[in-house]
Image (tube, rainbow, N blue to C red):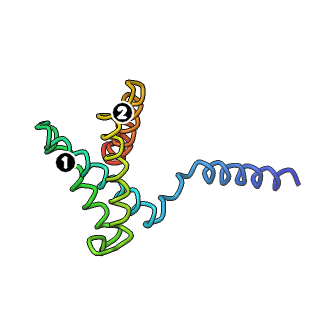
Amino acid sequence: MTRVFRPLVVAAFLVLSFWSAAPAAPPPPGDRAEAFAICAGRLWALSVRQAAVGDPSSQATGQMREDFDMLLGAVLPDAASDRQAQRWRVDGWVQIAHLLARNQYGATPRRRDLAATRMASRIDTCRRMILRR
C-alpha cells in the first residue's frame, strides 16, 4: 500500500506546486481597455500642459499617449467611436487637469506638493504599464 500511496502523494504535491505557482490570468479585455483609455487621457492632459509651457518632454508624453491609444484599439477595436472608452479617456484627462490646477493654484505649499505627488504617481502608473520600470 505504501508503494502505491507514495507516488500519488508526490504527484499531488507536484501538481499543486505548479498550479499555485502559475501566473494569474491577465485581466479581462474590458479592464485593460479602461486602464489604457484612462492612461491615454492622463497623458493627453499632461502633454497639452507641457506643450503650453514649452516643455520639450511634451513630444515624448504625446508619443506615449499614442501608444496607449494603440493598445486601446487592440483590445477594443471600435474604441474611437465607443462612448465608454471616451468616458474613460475624459476621466483620465480630468484627473490630471484637476491635479495640475491644484499644483499651480493650491492654497498652501502642502496642497501643491500633494497634488504634484499624486499626479506623478498616476503618470508613473501609466508609464510602468508600458515600460515595466
Position in image of residue 59 (x %, y %): 13, 45
- The answer to whether 54 appears left or right of 115 in the picture is left
Residue position for label 2: 106
Q: Residue at x 36, y 33 (%)?
A: 106
Of the pair 13 and 55, the residue shown nearer to us: 55
Which type of secondary structure does the marked residue at label 1 adopt? helix
Which type of secondary structure does the marked residue at label 2 adopt? loop
Asked if 62 appears above or below 110 in the picture, the reply is: below
> Dot 2, crowdedness within 10 Å: few (<14), some or many (≥20)?
some
Residue 115: image tag: none
Of the pair 3 and 100, the residue shown nearer to us: 100
- The answer to whether 36 appears left or right of 26 in the picture is left
Of the pair 26 and 13, the residue shown nearer to us: 26
Position in image of residue 111 (x %, y %): 41, 30
Position in image of residue 12 (x %, y %): 72, 54
Spatial CA span between label 2 and label 1 = 20 Å
Q: Residue furthest right?
A: 1
Of the pair 59 and 55, the residue shown nearer to us: 55
The reply to whether residue 51 is in sight is yes
Q: Amino acid at mark 1?
A: Val
Which of the marked residues, 2 or 1, is nearer the chain's N terminus? 1
Give the quarter of the figure containing the C terminus. top left
Where residue 75 sits, quadrant-wise, is: bottom left
Q: Residue at x 29, y 34 (%)?
A: 104
The reply to whether residue 132 is in sight is no
Q: Residue at x 35, y 45 (%)?
A: 98
Where residue 122 sits, quadrant-wise, is: top left
Residue depth check, mark 2 versus mark 1: number of the one nearer the observer: 2
Residue position for label 1: 48
Position in image of residue 1 (x %, y %): 88, 55
Q: Are marks 2 and 1 in contact (CB under 8 Å)?
A: no
